[in-house]
Image: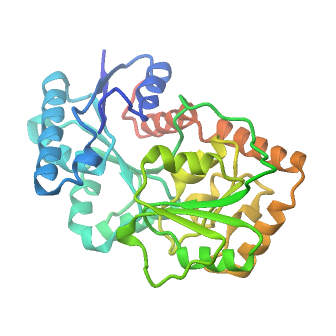
Amino acid sequence: MKKIFVVYDTPFKGNDKEWLGRCLKSNAETYRICEIQSPATLSRLARKGILGRLMVQFFIICQLLRVLICSGKEDIVLCWTVSCSKVAVKLFRGPFKRKIVSFGWLTPNHKNISGYKNVFRRDNVISVVNDENNIQKYADLCGLENTNRIVCIPDTYNDREQFEQPSFNDENRYVFCGGMNNRDWETYIKVAELCPEISFKGISLKSSWDNSLKLPSNVKMDFDTKVDFYYSCMKNAYITLFPLNEDKVSGLINIVKTIQYGVLGFITEINSTKVYFPEGFENFLLPFHDSDVIAQRIIDAFNYSKDEYTGKVEVLQQFLTDNISPDATVKRLLAFLYEREWLKA
Protein backbone atom coordinates (compact mmCIF):
# COMPACT_ATOMS: atom_id res chain seq x y z
CA MET A 1 0.00 0.00 0.00
CA LYS A 2 1.32 3.44 -0.92
CA LYS A 3 1.81 5.96 1.86
CA ILE A 4 1.15 9.62 2.64
CA PHE A 5 3.45 11.01 5.33
CA VAL A 6 2.37 14.04 7.38
CA VAL A 7 5.28 15.88 9.00
CA TYR A 8 4.04 18.11 11.83
CA ASP A 9 5.85 20.94 13.60
CA THR A 10 4.53 19.98 17.07
CA PRO A 11 4.27 16.93 19.33
CA PHE A 12 1.05 14.92 19.06
CA LYS A 13 -0.04 16.23 22.46
CA GLY A 14 -1.60 19.63 21.86
CA ASN A 15 -1.31 19.34 18.08
CA ASP A 16 -4.00 21.60 16.60
CA LYS A 17 -3.27 20.26 13.10
CA GLU A 18 -4.18 16.66 13.90
CA TRP A 19 -7.27 17.12 11.71
CA LEU A 20 -5.01 16.72 8.68
CA GLY A 21 -4.02 13.15 9.41
CA ARG A 22 -7.49 12.25 10.68
CA CYS A 23 -9.28 13.58 7.58
CA LEU A 24 -6.73 12.00 5.25
CA LYS A 25 -7.44 8.62 6.85
CA SER A 26 -11.16 8.98 6.16
CA ASN A 27 -10.82 10.40 2.63
CA ALA A 28 -7.74 8.62 1.19
CA GLU A 29 -8.61 5.09 2.23
CA THR A 30 -6.42 3.40 -0.39
CA TYR A 31 -3.32 5.02 1.14
CA ARG A 32 -1.64 4.39 4.46
CA ILE A 33 -1.37 7.65 6.45
CA CYS A 34 1.81 7.96 8.53
CA GLU A 35 2.05 10.87 10.96
CA ILE A 36 5.44 12.13 12.14
CA GLN A 37 5.44 14.32 15.24
CA SER A 38 8.10 16.77 16.33
CA PRO A 39 9.70 16.41 19.78
CA ALA A 40 9.01 20.11 20.42
CA THR A 41 6.83 22.95 19.14
CA LEU A 42 9.18 24.33 16.51
CA SER A 43 7.70 27.83 16.29
CA ARG A 44 8.45 28.38 19.98
CA LEU A 45 11.89 26.84 19.73
CA ALA A 46 12.77 29.10 16.78
CA ARG A 47 12.31 32.17 19.02
CA LYS A 48 15.09 31.06 21.37
CA GLY A 49 18.03 32.50 19.50
CA ILE A 50 20.62 30.80 17.36
CA LEU A 51 20.66 27.60 19.40
CA GLY A 52 16.88 27.33 19.13
CA ARG A 53 16.98 27.75 15.36
CA LEU A 54 19.71 25.12 15.06
CA MET A 55 17.60 22.73 17.13
CA VAL A 56 14.67 23.35 14.77
CA GLN A 57 16.80 22.33 11.78
CA PHE A 58 18.10 19.27 13.64
CA PHE A 59 14.59 18.08 14.56
CA ILE A 60 13.33 18.59 10.99
CA ILE A 61 16.25 16.61 9.56
CA CYS A 62 15.54 13.78 12.02
CA GLN A 63 11.87 13.73 11.03
CA LEU A 64 12.64 13.67 7.31
CA LEU A 65 15.33 10.99 7.64
CA ARG A 66 12.71 8.83 9.30
CA VAL A 67 10.38 9.49 6.36
CA LEU A 68 13.15 8.69 3.89
CA ILE A 69 13.86 5.32 5.51
CA CYS A 70 10.16 4.33 5.60
CA SER A 71 9.04 5.65 2.20
CA GLY A 72 9.28 4.81 -1.47
CA LYS A 73 9.51 6.92 -4.63
CA GLU A 74 5.74 6.98 -5.21
CA ASP A 75 4.88 8.02 -1.65
CA ILE A 76 3.87 11.57 -0.77
CA VAL A 77 5.32 13.73 2.01
CA LEU A 78 3.18 16.57 3.41
CA CYS A 79 5.40 19.21 5.07
CA TRP A 80 3.34 21.44 7.33
CA THR A 81 5.89 24.30 7.44
CA VAL A 82 8.00 26.16 4.91
CA SER A 83 11.11 25.36 6.98
CA CYS A 84 10.40 21.65 6.67
CA SER A 85 9.83 21.96 2.91
CA LYS A 86 13.14 23.76 2.39
CA VAL A 87 15.00 20.90 4.05
CA ALA A 88 12.90 18.28 2.24
CA VAL A 89 13.76 19.55 -1.26
CA LYS A 90 17.46 19.24 -0.44
CA LEU A 91 17.11 15.77 1.06
CA PHE A 92 14.59 14.20 -1.34
CA ARG A 93 16.49 14.39 -4.61
CA GLY A 94 18.27 12.06 -7.02
CA PRO A 95 17.72 8.42 -6.00
CA PHE A 96 15.89 9.60 -2.87
CA LYS A 97 13.36 11.76 -4.69
CA ARG A 98 9.89 11.90 -3.12
CA LYS A 99 6.69 13.81 -3.91
CA ILE A 100 6.41 16.79 -1.55
CA VAL A 101 3.32 18.84 -0.66
CA SER A 102 4.53 22.09 0.88
CA PHE A 103 2.15 23.98 3.18
CA GLY A 104 2.49 27.40 4.81
CA TRP A 105 3.20 29.80 1.96
CA LEU A 106 1.94 33.26 2.89
CA THR A 107 2.42 36.57 1.07
CA PRO A 108 5.80 36.46 -0.72
CA ASN A 109 8.67 38.61 0.48
CA HIS A 110 10.98 39.85 -2.26
CA LYS A 111 13.99 39.36 0.05
CA ASN A 112 13.54 35.57 -0.03
CA ILE A 113 13.35 34.95 -3.78
CA SER A 114 16.23 32.46 -3.84
CA GLY A 115 14.59 30.43 -1.08
CA TYR A 116 11.29 30.40 -3.00
CA LYS A 117 12.94 29.24 -6.21
CA ASN A 118 14.53 26.27 -4.45
CA VAL A 119 11.03 24.98 -3.65
CA PHE A 120 8.68 26.25 -6.36
CA ARG A 121 10.90 25.24 -9.29
CA ARG A 122 11.10 21.60 -8.22
CA ASP A 123 8.99 19.26 -10.33
CA ASN A 124 8.39 17.03 -7.29
CA VAL A 125 6.80 19.78 -5.17
CA ILE A 126 3.22 21.04 -4.97
CA SER A 127 2.96 24.25 -2.95
CA VAL A 128 -0.13 25.30 -0.98
CA VAL A 129 -0.96 29.00 -0.59
CA ASN A 130 -3.95 30.51 1.23
CA ASP A 131 -4.53 33.49 -1.07
CA GLU A 132 -5.48 33.02 -4.73
CA ASN A 133 -3.55 36.17 -5.70
CA ASN A 134 -0.32 34.69 -4.37
CA ILE A 135 -0.30 31.89 -6.96
CA GLN A 136 0.70 34.27 -9.75
CA LYS A 137 2.96 36.30 -7.43
CA TYR A 138 5.07 33.24 -6.64
CA ALA A 139 5.04 32.16 -10.29
CA ASP A 140 6.34 35.57 -11.37
CA LEU A 141 9.00 35.75 -8.65
CA CYS A 142 10.26 32.24 -9.42
CA GLY A 143 10.04 32.53 -13.21
CA LEU A 144 7.59 29.64 -13.56
CA GLU A 145 6.13 28.96 -16.99
CA ASN A 146 2.83 27.84 -15.45
CA THR A 147 1.12 27.51 -12.07
CA ASN A 148 0.02 23.88 -12.25
CA ARG A 149 2.00 22.94 -9.13
CA ILE A 150 0.53 25.66 -6.91
CA VAL A 151 -2.90 25.37 -5.27
CA CYS A 152 -4.86 27.79 -3.11
CA ILE A 153 -6.53 26.23 -0.06
CA PRO A 154 -7.97 28.61 2.59
CA ASP A 155 -6.86 28.11 6.19
CA THR A 156 -9.25 25.88 8.10
CA TYR A 157 -10.02 25.56 11.81
CA ASN A 158 -9.41 22.99 14.52
CA ASP A 159 -12.66 21.03 14.62
CA ARG A 160 -11.79 19.56 18.01
CA GLU A 161 -12.84 22.97 19.34
CA GLN A 162 -16.62 23.16 19.41
CA PHE A 163 -18.59 25.94 17.76
CA GLU A 164 -20.13 27.91 20.60
CA GLN A 165 -23.56 29.43 20.85
CA PRO A 166 -23.63 33.13 19.86
CA SER A 167 -22.85 35.28 22.89
CA PHE A 168 -25.07 38.35 23.01
CA ASN A 169 -23.78 40.06 26.14
CA ASP A 170 -25.93 42.88 27.44
CA GLU A 171 -23.30 43.95 29.98
CA ASN A 172 -19.62 44.78 29.78
CA ARG A 173 -19.63 44.91 25.99
CA TYR A 174 -16.36 45.71 24.30
CA VAL A 175 -14.57 45.56 20.95
CA PHE A 176 -11.50 43.32 20.91
CA CYS A 177 -8.47 43.57 18.65
CA GLY A 178 -5.26 41.57 18.84
CA GLY A 179 -2.46 40.05 16.82
CA MET A 180 1.28 39.86 16.31
CA ASN A 181 1.66 41.50 12.91
CA ASN A 182 0.06 43.72 10.28
CA ARG A 183 -2.45 45.33 12.64
CA ASP A 184 -3.43 48.92 11.95
CA TRP A 185 -3.46 50.12 15.54
CA GLU A 186 -3.59 53.75 14.51
CA THR A 187 -6.93 53.20 12.76
CA TYR A 188 -8.15 51.09 15.69
CA ILE A 189 -7.50 53.98 18.05
CA LYS A 190 -9.14 56.50 15.71
CA VAL A 191 -12.23 54.27 15.57
CA ALA A 192 -12.30 54.18 19.38
CA GLU A 193 -12.12 57.98 19.48
CA LEU A 194 -15.15 58.12 17.17
CA CYS A 195 -17.05 55.72 19.47
CA PRO A 196 -16.50 57.24 22.94
CA GLU A 197 -19.42 55.32 24.48
CA ILE A 198 -17.97 51.93 23.49
CA SER A 199 -15.13 50.11 25.31
CA PHE A 200 -12.17 48.76 23.36
CA LYS A 201 -9.61 46.14 24.43
CA GLY A 202 -6.44 45.33 22.56
CA ILE A 203 -3.51 42.93 22.90
CA SER A 204 -0.23 43.45 21.08
CA LEU A 205 3.44 42.62 21.30
CA LYS A 206 5.37 45.31 23.13
CA SER A 207 8.20 44.96 20.62
CA SER A 208 5.95 45.96 17.72
CA TRP A 209 3.91 48.66 19.47
CA ASP A 210 4.27 52.30 18.42
CA ASN A 211 4.80 54.17 21.69
CA SER A 212 3.81 57.46 20.06
CA LEU A 213 0.17 56.29 19.91
CA LYS A 214 -1.99 58.01 22.52
CA LEU A 215 -4.75 55.90 24.01
CA PRO A 216 -8.18 57.47 24.60
CA SER A 217 -9.90 56.69 27.91
CA ASN A 218 -12.12 53.97 26.37
CA VAL A 219 -9.17 51.86 25.18
CA LYS A 220 -7.32 49.36 27.36
CA MET A 221 -4.18 47.71 25.96
CA ASP A 222 -2.30 44.64 27.23
CA PHE A 223 1.03 43.39 25.94
CA ASP A 224 2.81 40.05 25.61
CA THR A 225 0.02 38.12 27.30
CA LYS A 226 -0.38 34.36 27.50
CA VAL A 227 -2.34 32.66 24.74
CA ASP A 228 -5.15 31.58 27.06
CA PHE A 229 -5.71 35.16 28.20
CA TYR A 230 -5.66 36.37 24.60
CA TYR A 231 -8.38 33.97 23.48
CA SER A 232 -10.39 34.59 26.63
CA CYS A 233 -10.55 38.29 25.73
CA MET A 234 -11.62 37.38 22.21
CA LYS A 235 -14.23 34.92 23.42
CA ASN A 236 -15.83 37.40 25.82
CA ALA A 237 -15.96 40.29 23.37
CA TYR A 238 -19.17 41.60 21.84
CA ILE A 239 -17.40 41.98 18.51
CA THR A 240 -13.83 41.68 17.26
CA LEU A 241 -12.12 44.13 14.93
CA PHE A 242 -8.96 43.40 12.94
CA PRO A 243 -7.91 46.38 10.77
CA LEU A 244 -4.88 45.48 8.68
CA ASN A 245 -2.02 47.74 7.65
CA GLU A 246 -1.37 46.30 4.21
CA ASP A 247 -2.57 43.70 1.74
CA LYS A 248 -0.79 40.60 2.95
CA VAL A 249 -2.15 37.39 4.44
CA SER A 250 -2.86 37.93 8.14
CA GLY A 251 -5.65 37.79 10.70
CA LEU A 252 -7.13 34.54 9.38
CA ILE A 253 -6.78 32.49 12.58
CA ASN A 254 -8.28 35.37 14.54
CA ILE A 255 -11.37 35.81 12.37
CA VAL A 256 -12.00 32.04 12.24
CA LYS A 257 -11.70 31.66 16.01
CA THR A 258 -14.00 34.65 16.47
CA ILE A 259 -16.70 32.87 14.50
CA GLN A 260 -16.07 29.60 16.35
CA TYR A 261 -16.52 31.43 19.66
CA GLY A 262 -19.93 32.73 18.56
CA VAL A 263 -18.73 36.34 18.26
CA LEU A 264 -19.22 38.70 15.32
CA GLY A 265 -15.98 39.85 13.72
CA PHE A 266 -14.84 42.58 11.33
CA ILE A 267 -11.62 42.45 9.31
CA THR A 268 -10.03 44.41 6.46
CA GLU A 269 -11.09 43.16 3.04
CA ILE A 270 -8.30 41.41 1.18
CA ASN A 271 -8.44 38.35 -1.04
CA SER A 272 -7.59 35.91 1.75
CA THR A 273 -10.19 37.26 4.21
CA LYS A 274 -13.14 37.40 1.78
CA VAL A 275 -13.45 33.62 1.64
CA TYR A 276 -14.70 33.46 5.24
CA PHE A 277 -17.79 35.58 4.61
CA PRO A 278 -20.82 34.52 2.54
CA GLU A 279 -22.76 36.75 0.18
CA GLY A 280 -24.63 39.43 2.10
CA PHE A 281 -21.91 39.91 4.72
CA GLU A 282 -19.89 42.52 2.84
CA ASN A 283 -20.25 45.01 5.71
CA PHE A 284 -17.99 42.83 7.85
CA LEU A 285 -15.18 43.35 5.34
CA LEU A 286 -13.57 46.72 5.92
CA PRO A 287 -11.79 49.29 3.74
CA PHE A 288 -8.17 50.09 4.55
CA HIS A 289 -7.55 52.91 7.06
CA ASP A 290 -11.07 54.41 6.85
CA SER A 291 -11.86 55.05 10.51
CA ASP A 292 -15.13 56.86 9.74
CA VAL A 293 -16.63 53.94 7.82
CA ILE A 294 -15.35 51.39 10.34
CA ALA A 295 -16.69 53.36 13.31
CA GLN A 296 -20.16 53.53 11.78
CA ARG A 297 -20.20 49.78 11.20
CA ILE A 298 -19.19 49.20 14.82
CA ILE A 299 -21.97 51.47 16.02
CA ASP A 300 -24.46 49.67 13.77
CA ALA A 301 -23.39 46.30 15.20
CA PHE A 302 -23.86 47.55 18.75
CA ASN A 303 -27.45 48.38 17.82
CA TYR A 304 -28.29 44.83 16.66
CA SER A 305 -31.14 43.10 18.43
CA LYS A 306 -30.37 39.73 20.00
CA ASP A 307 -32.07 37.94 17.11
CA GLU A 308 -30.09 39.92 14.52
CA TYR A 309 -26.81 39.24 16.28
CA THR A 310 -27.32 35.52 16.86
CA GLY A 311 -28.76 35.03 13.37
CA LYS A 312 -25.68 36.50 11.71
CA VAL A 313 -23.30 34.42 13.83
CA GLU A 314 -25.21 31.24 13.01
CA VAL A 315 -25.01 31.96 9.27
CA LEU A 316 -21.25 32.53 9.54
CA GLN A 317 -20.74 29.34 11.53
CA GLN A 318 -22.71 27.30 9.02
CA PHE A 319 -20.75 28.84 6.15
CA LEU A 320 -17.46 27.82 7.79
CA THR A 321 -18.73 24.31 8.42
CA ASP A 322 -19.87 23.87 4.81
CA ASN A 323 -16.90 25.46 3.05
CA ILE A 324 -13.81 25.73 5.27
CA SER A 325 -14.02 22.66 7.50
CA PRO A 326 -11.00 20.34 7.86
CA ASP A 327 -12.86 17.67 5.88
CA ALA A 328 -13.62 20.12 3.04
CA THR A 329 -10.00 21.30 3.14
CA VAL A 330 -8.57 17.80 2.80
CA LYS A 331 -11.02 16.92 0.02
CA ARG A 332 -9.90 20.05 -1.86
CA LEU A 333 -6.26 19.00 -1.49
CA LEU A 334 -6.90 15.41 -2.57
CA ALA A 335 -8.90 16.55 -5.61
CA PHE A 336 -5.90 18.62 -6.72
CA LEU A 337 -3.51 15.69 -6.20
CA TYR A 338 -5.76 13.38 -8.22
CA GLU A 339 -6.01 16.04 -10.94
CA ARG A 340 -2.20 16.20 -11.09
CA GLU A 341 -2.08 12.38 -11.06
CA TRP A 342 -0.04 12.30 -7.87
CA LEU A 343 -2.72 10.04 -6.41
CA LYS A 344 -4.32 7.05 -8.08
CA ALA A 345 -7.86 5.88 -7.34
Q: Position of residue 237 (x, y in %)?
A: 67, 52
- Where on the picture, by quarter, is residue 65? top left
Q: Position of residue 330 (x, y in %)?
A: 49, 34
- Where on the picture, by quarter, is residue 303? bottom right
Give the residue displayed 73% in from the left and 36% down from the top: 165
Residues 220 and 208: in front is: 220
Q: Position of residue 138 (x, y in %)?
A: 37, 64
Q: Position of residue 59 (x, y in %)?
A: 15, 38
User: Is 249 left or right of 14, judged from the image as shown?
Assistant: right
Quadrant where the N terminus sits is: top left
Residues 95 and 104: in front is: 104
Residues 75 and 287: in front is: 287
User: Is 1 left or right of 314, judged from the image as shown?
Assistant: left
Look at the picture and state if 24 lies above or below 90. above
Give the residue displayed 51% in from the left and 72% down from the top: 247
Quadrant where the C terminus sits is: top left
Residue 153 seen by the camera: no
Q: Residue furthest bottom?
A: 212
